[in-house]
Image: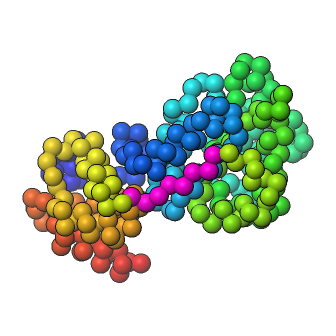
Amino acid sequence: MYDAYWGLNRRPFDATDESEFYYPAQSHQIALLKLRYAIEQRAGAGLLVGEAGVGKTLLARLLQNQLSDDHQPIAHVAFPPPDFGDLIRGVTDQIAGRGDADETLDRTSARLEAALREAADEERRPLLVIDEAQVIERPADLDRLRMLFSFQRCGAPLLGLVLVAQPRFLSSLQLAPQLEPHFTAKCVVQPFGLDETISYVQHRLAAAGSDRPIFTDRALELIHRHADGAARRINRLCDLSMLIGYADELSAIDADQILAVVNELSFAA
């Protein structure tokens, strides 16, 4: 709606995981490097932790895009089902193809193992990414995840694994001491600092075609403060304030527009 008004070729703050909008903040880059190392060197499982809205899912998608075909197929599960059998069936369907609707868990596990061994014969190691893994809270359910490491050849797991979770998952993981040692790459994604927030906003505007500043320095400071450095909240504040600026035919976004959005969102909450 407002993109042409601001001289853009697309909306810069849409909820998207497109790689051209990725901003390489320090903690994000370190996490991406550590996860790639763990997967490519077959050094164990990876754990990516961060508060809601800091960009974990985007990092997981970038990771998948950067991996070679040696890690295909990639199974991606968001909000894993509470029943472990349903989780394994969903993973197996993505890696080995869909099975019968009434297939037993033993048969599903056998199909998954056969597919992983076939991949190993072709020097491939498929990858499983479980997003929002913090919903797996019970120690018994966490312990059952160890089954994914039981498919091995010469002592090396045939399936790569990355869990993406909010910080509370770390407390749950402490209750599963037999699972925790499998995670050799533990990464924490931090919210942006003020300078990173400013660079992030400018980066997304430039990626959308902007060739001039749109937010004043004061507006950027308020965006950082009220978003707590979380990319998702930054996007929302910027998007709505640009809509207000378009409606009011402004030439730039200042503190008044940011505060108006903050007050509106607070009232709605």
Residue closest to the far top: 122
Q: Quarter-wise, where is residue 2 in the image?
A: bottom left
Q: Residue at x 16, y 66 (%)?
A: 254
At a point 78% along the width and 33% down the height, the residue shown is 156
Q: Is residue 31 left or right of residue 232?
A: right
Magenta segment range?
185-192
Q: Is residue 241 visible?
A: no
Q: Quadrant of the C terminus?
A: bottom left
User: Residue 209 lies in magenta, yes or no?
Assistant: no
Please tell me whether residue 5 is drawn above or below residue 112 in the rendered image: below
Percent coordinates x, y for residue 225 in the rendering? 32, 70
Residue 141 horizontal/vertical position (percent): 79, 58
Q: Is residue 190 magenta?
A: yes
Give the side of residue 138 with respect to residue 67, left or right: right
Q: How many marks?
A: 0
Nearer the observer, 207 or 269: 207
Residue 83 image-quadrant placement: bottom right
Residue 186 visible here: yes
Is 67 in front, or is 267? Answer: 67
* Image point (41%, 39%), residue name: 19
132 vs 25, left or right, is right
Horizontal and vertical percent position of residue 264 = 30, 76
Q: 28 or 88: nearer the eye?
A: 28
Quadrant of residue 113 within the rendered picture: top right
